[in-house]
Amino acid sequence: MTEPLRIAIAGLGTVGAGTVKVLREHADLLAGRCGRPLEVVAVSARDRDRDRGVDLSGYAWYDDAATMAAEAPCDVVVELIGGEGGMAHAVCETALRRGRHVVTANKALLAHHGPALARTAGETGAALAYEAAVAGGIPAVKGVREGLAGNRIDAVTGILNGTCNFILTKMRNEGRDFDDVLKEAQDLGYAEADPGVDVDGTDAAHKAALLAAVAYGTPVDFDAIPVEGIRRISSLDIHYAEELGYRIKLLGLARRAGDGLEVRVSPYMVPLSAPLAHIEDVTNAVAVEGDAIGRAVFEGPGAGQGPTASAVVADLVDIARGNMPPVFGTGLDTMQPQRILTADERRGPAYVRLMVVDRAGVFAEIAAALRDEGVSMEAVLQHGRNPGETVPVVLTLHETDQAALRRVLDRINSLDAVVEPPMMLPIEPL
Amino acid sequence: MTEPLRIAIAGLGTVGAGTVKVLREHADLLAGRCGRPLEVVAVSARDRDRDRGVDLSGYAWYDDAATMAAEAPCDVVVELIGGEGGMAHAVCETALRRGRHVVTANKALLAHHGPALARTAGETGAALAYEAAVAGGIPAVKGVREGLAGNRIDAVTGILNGTCNFILTKMRNEGRDFDDVLKEAQDLGYAEADPGVDVDGTDAAHKAALLAAVAYGTPVDFDAIPVEGIRRISSLDIHYAEELGYRIKLLGLARRAGDGLEVRVSPYMVPLSAPLAHIEDVTNAVAVEGDAIGRAVFEGPGAGQGPTASAVVADLVDIARGNMPPVFGTGLDTMQPQRILTADERRGPAYVRLMVVDRAGVFAEIAAALRDEGVSMEAVLQHGRNPGETVPVVLTLHETDQAALRRVLDRINSLDAVVEPPMMLPIEPL
């Protein structure tokens, strides 16, 4: 096959313009790599007159992206509009129904509608590719779905949100508070004016859902994933993490556990011996544990024009070469629904920070609460004394059931001497 | 397509047995992932009676692997015999000529005969897959050839030999000498009785040649690659590296430079700020710089039964799914021969350690030699004085031409006060 792969691009923001740029600059290189040209034939965006830094004059322009997906003379539609439904969904659905391949960077859309879109793609024989939706430029989906296809995957753990990792890195390096660093991240363009999707863990959860789906060949119920962001992390916790030999990282993970899958997004204490502890600033990384390979780690830029365009174009190259692996790693008829564990079903070590009034007998009450639920302490840190004042007490706990730990923390929270709700972070012994 | 992919395996050593094991244990998982079963139909090895820990009774046995490659009723031949020519070459050549796909872990064979075998594969439409030949289980070939296919690759840099990395890590952590640690590595099975292929850099050079070929779409003349191993590294150098903020790593690299490619294997001083500085023990890693993505790093186990089998099976999954990208990343007709730079053509910073008799005037002679060739010093370390005795003098040099530096070192070496040949290590500002 030497005919061009004809491409229509819906959405000409940073990533859309970057994709056009890469396809133009590397036209010859890509034709050699694919054995056929990759040719943009149509584009669609709301504002026709904006300067996007690339020449779009040679392409058919559609004001309506869904119309383009239906009518443009193309083989592939690249969806870079964003959003979990609406126009992005209409574009993908329309293209796939017509047997047109779809490449998208839209994690929200796929986390919610991925299985349904995959079925549509399966019916018409179209590809649904989404490397850019997970960990930006890093070929993480490819790494799991193809590179490690010989493995039963036991765990996938990732630093999947650059904004959160940047904030946590800054908080640690500069001893600053969350709100303060968030503001700087916003000024630098690393965080949105409305930062909730990033700092509350939603974005990481979208990506974790996709990694779980592709690693385990299962449709993931996004709403079942326990998600917690980084707003509650204080500089005290960062400080204690260092002292205990950990770093706090927002992780998205998907792990075989009991009769189901533990899929979860949360700030974790990660030991310094783990590769993910050393991923800093806006860098993303995905660690994959498989039964044959042991562990592989993929690391790189998780966002930005160039990296995201790199992933979009890689998907286009795959399609041009005829590489269309199953959307979620296994044939649709062999996908297995799996139960997502609730937060309470986690079992593992944990870090707890209490703010207590420094007076005699408090620690005995805390110890009794732990004992009554069979929760076992590994270490206690209580630096200095300050009778009558509020002081932090930090505990690390051995492997414990989260449900029992929650009951312990409820009871501790009800103690008079405990002046704010306990802070708990799971420890991930990667 | 739902017929089985029929597989014949030549060579039943550790990796061959591991591959059979993975294919048996994960038969259902793999069938789901490929949409068709992966079925071993034939095997070949010299010793029929050896216990390999897997049941081979269901497979046709061939005493002669080339006969199997020609005659077994198979779609793919997996070559795990090893060696740069001989039977391994005959097996691959025979299979490809008949249009049978080949999967191999044989870096020596491909470094020498890769382009010729790729042409044969091209003529018959067969795949020639070799993920296991580079960096063990890490999907590095896939990462470069597919995952980063949207990029013009600027540099590929890898820790590609686990034995050398293990030795260098131990030397540093335990302050021990090369010979001493080599012996331990041999006792642990990390190094061969004849360690030359590893510690002299040949194995890393095979892998660097393949990475260069796939990253730049070029046939690489293996014999043109400057190769140096780690035998000359002393514990003094390790010590000074630490003091200067570097780690010594055996790197294989391939970089666009001037009118050609710098492909090289050498111990390098790597700054602690570089991800590769932190890859320890037998772990491998490949850092890829591309114009769109910036930098991605792939990390994991570089050898061993499970990891290597993981890569072999990934290649089989690709073939079963019909994913057969160009052997060296671009169509045969678009491959561009490129000149490999000689060692003297390198330009970059460097570390030099001299062993000199501590007496007045020596340093002036050294400084004059540098000055006369226009080589500029960044730092000098000369700890303590010991008049009349031999002491180390360490220099770090700014970006300099290796040819000029070689002339400087020849002149320094001829000084009476210099008692052994200067040690030079390139500094890689990754």
Image: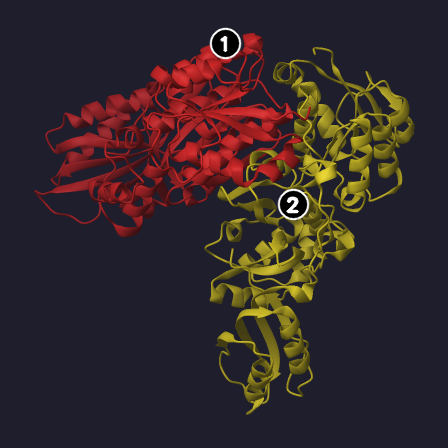
Chain colours: A yellow, B red
- Residue, x 29% and y 25% (percent of image)? B405
Q: Chain of mark 2?
A: A
Crowding at dot 2, Cα within 10 Å, few <14 / some 14-19 / many 20+, comes out as: many
Percent across and percent down for residue B220 are 43, 15
Q: Amino acid at mark 1?
A: Arg
What is the quadrant of residue B394 in the picture? Answer: top left
Q: Is residue B373 visible?
A: yes
Q: Which residue is mark 1?
A: B97
**Front one among A404 and B361:** A404
Kindly give the residue lying farthest to the front in the view shown: B57
Disc assigned to residue A216: 2
Q: Is residue B355 above or below residue A17?
A: below
Going by the image, does B278 lie left or right of A255?
left
- Residue, x 60% and y 77% (percent of image)? A354
Going by the image, does B40 lie left or right of B151?
left
Percent across and percent down for residue B86 are 34, 15
